[in-house]
Amino acid sequence: MWWFEVSSIFQKGQFFGTDFVFATSLFLFMLSILLVTGNQVSVRVESVQNEHEMRFGAFHAFQALTLSPGSPSHWNTFSSPLDVNALGLAIRSGVLDEAKIQRLADWNASYYIELKAVLGIPRYDFYLHVKDENLNVVSAVGALPDVNKTRVVLFRPVMVGSHKRWLELGVFK
Amino acid sequence: MNSKGFVITVDAMAAAFVLFSFLLAINQYYAQIQVRGWNDLELFRFSDSALGVLENSGELEYAVLSNQSTRIRSYLNDFPANVCAELLVYAQSDLNVPLLSVSKEGCSAEYDVRSTALHSTVVHYASDLNFFVAQLNGWYRK
């Protein structure tokens, strides 16, 4: 009878054999490698994306500072940055207003968070340094980063009044 | 038929090797991702700003009138170590041969990407207004 044959197959069969254990182990090993690799790729892509966002913010803040007078253009006459729409230091393209730089420095202690927001980089910290031809800092705004913090630094030659200067913007998280 | 078999075969080994190679290649590829586009854009902005400084400070006019490039070379030499640059000044009447050509010292013309900023500038000489085109090329040192 056929049910006797089936019964005998089940009784003598070896379901959990060495080859099965080996194949399962190999599969799990491969799967774990795949997951680890996938995770590394994900971390790397996220890191690049974060750096991209930071550079985007830094670049546009720097552009506004060096190329525009800000909005309104006489913002340096205000008592706080709360009514300022956009910060800009330029008298004309690449030539910066010393009075506006000084105003930023004055506001730094009391309105640092507001300055970040007006610069368009509320999620990050920043520093803005004006350096002379020997790279000595002549004016500083913002906070200094820890050594280990990820940062984007932009460096550009500018004129401040009639002086040749270097402007450095560091953005960090 | 009763002896125990072993499932590792050469084709299985080859398949595992290919899979590992693919995983390694993917990992290597993603590890090399960089945000390079911003560097090129920033290089252009740097070159444009530097040319603006030379123009606004009067260095460009002085160099054209005196045919002296010492001060401009000194300025280019102060650029960050990884940035190379050369300044070319053309008379508006002849844009093929530069009147003035100054390069940063220690830089060779080897680059992947070169950024070019162009400004037209007017130089007063006697009672004449002379038009010039200043070109600043910048590139990252290799």
Image (spheres, helix red, strand yellow):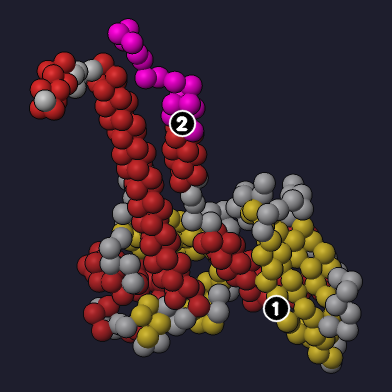
- Say above or below: A45 vs A148: below
Q: Measure how far apart labels 2 and 1 are at the Cα level.
A: 60 Å
Instruction: Specify few, some or many for label 1: CA neighbours under 10 Å numbering under 14, 14-19, or 20 or more.
Output: some
Residue extending farthest bottom: B127
Subunit of mark 1?
Answer: B
Q: Quadrant where the N terminus of chain A lies?
A: top left
Three-letter code for the amino acid on which mark 1 is drawn: His
Q: From the image, state whether disc 2 or disc 1 is nearer to you.
A: 2
The magenta-colored residue range is B1-18
- Say above or below: A84 vs B111: below
Q: Which residue is nearer to you in this view: B112 or B95?
A: B112
Q: Is residue A109 left or right of residue A9?
A: right
Tell me which residue sits at (75%, 65%) in the image: B87
- Say above or below: B42 vs B129: above
- Residue underneath mark 1: B119
Subunit of mark 2?
Answer: B
Q: Position of residue B104 (x, y in %)?
A: 73, 55
User: Under tag 1, what secondary structure?
Assistant: strand
Q: Is residue A154 left or right of residue A1?
A: right
- Residue underneath mark 2: B15
Q: Which residue is nearer to you in this view: A154 or B110?
A: B110
Q: Position of residue A119 (x, y in %)?
A: 35, 72
Q: Is residue B5 magenta?
A: yes
User: Under tag 2, what secondary structure?
Assistant: helix
